[in-house]
Image: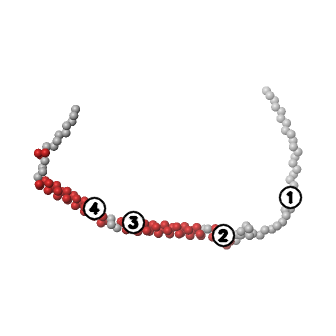
């Protein structure tokens, strides 16, 4: 079964000048409305790019400031700073502490070990 498409009847098409003029005016109005919409959107968003650039510059400045502050914190909590704090609180280096030389006294000997005893095991088989 074959389905045939019917061709439109060209004799019923309205091809008068008035119809074409109305279509042209309609399309022109649509294009003008779209153009005005695009120009309006551009006018409303023209400050977005400079604001974005300013935000990026501020972000770069803040990142630099963060890095500098991190470096400062590391220097303040570094080994030299901790050493100075330890010396200020009366601590000394192990190598610089006073040593005393002496001999150990006589160490008491441990109790003598008991003599070894043998272990005897008896096995009964049932």
Q: Earlier in the sequence, mark 2 or mark 4?
A: 4
The percent position of residue 57, horizontal first and vertical second, equals 43, 68
The percent position of residue 123, horizontal first and vertical second, equals 82, 31
- Which residue is rendered at x = 86% and y = 58% of the image? 107
Mark 4 secondary-structure assignment: helix
Q: Are marks 2 and 4 in contact (CB under 8 Å)?
A: no
Mark 2 or mark 3, whichever is nearer to me = 3
Q: Report the disc number at residue 52.
A: 3
* Residue that carries the numbered disc 4 in the rendered image: 38
Q: Earlier in the sequence, mark 4 or mark 1?
A: 4
Q: Earlier in the sequence, mark 2 or mark 1?
A: 2
Q: CA distance from mark 2 to mark 3?
A: 47 Å
Q: CA distance from mark 2 to mark 1?
A: 40 Å
Q: CA distance from mark 3 to mark 4?
A: 21 Å
- Which residue is rendered at x = 81% and y = 29% of the image? 124
* Residue that carries the numbered disc 2 in the rendered image: 83
Q: CA distance from mark 3 to mark 1?
A: 82 Å
Q: Quadrant of residue 116?
A: top right
Q: Are marks 4 and 1 in contact (CB under 8 Å)?
A: no
Position of residue 3 in the picture relative to residue 85 (left or right): left
Mark 2 or mark 4, whichever is nearer to me = 4
Q: Nearer the viewer, residue 27 or 111?
A: 27
């Amino acid at each position: 079964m074959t389905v045939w498409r019917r061709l439109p009847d060209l004799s019923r098409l309205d091809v008068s000048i008035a119809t074409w003029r109305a279509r042209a005016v309609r399309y022109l109005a649509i294009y003008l409305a779209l153009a005005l919409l695009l120009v309006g959107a551009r006018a409303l968003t023209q400050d977005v790019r400079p604001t974005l650039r300013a935000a990026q510059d501020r972000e770069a400045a803040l990142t630099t400031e963060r890095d500098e502050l991190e470096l400062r914190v590391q220097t303040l909590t570094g080994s030299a700073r901790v050493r100075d704090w330890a010396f200020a609180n009366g601590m000394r280096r192990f190598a610089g502490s006073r040593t005393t030389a002496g001999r150990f006294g006589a160490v008491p000997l441990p109790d003598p070990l008991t003599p070894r005893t043998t272990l005897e095991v008896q096995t009964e088989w049932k």
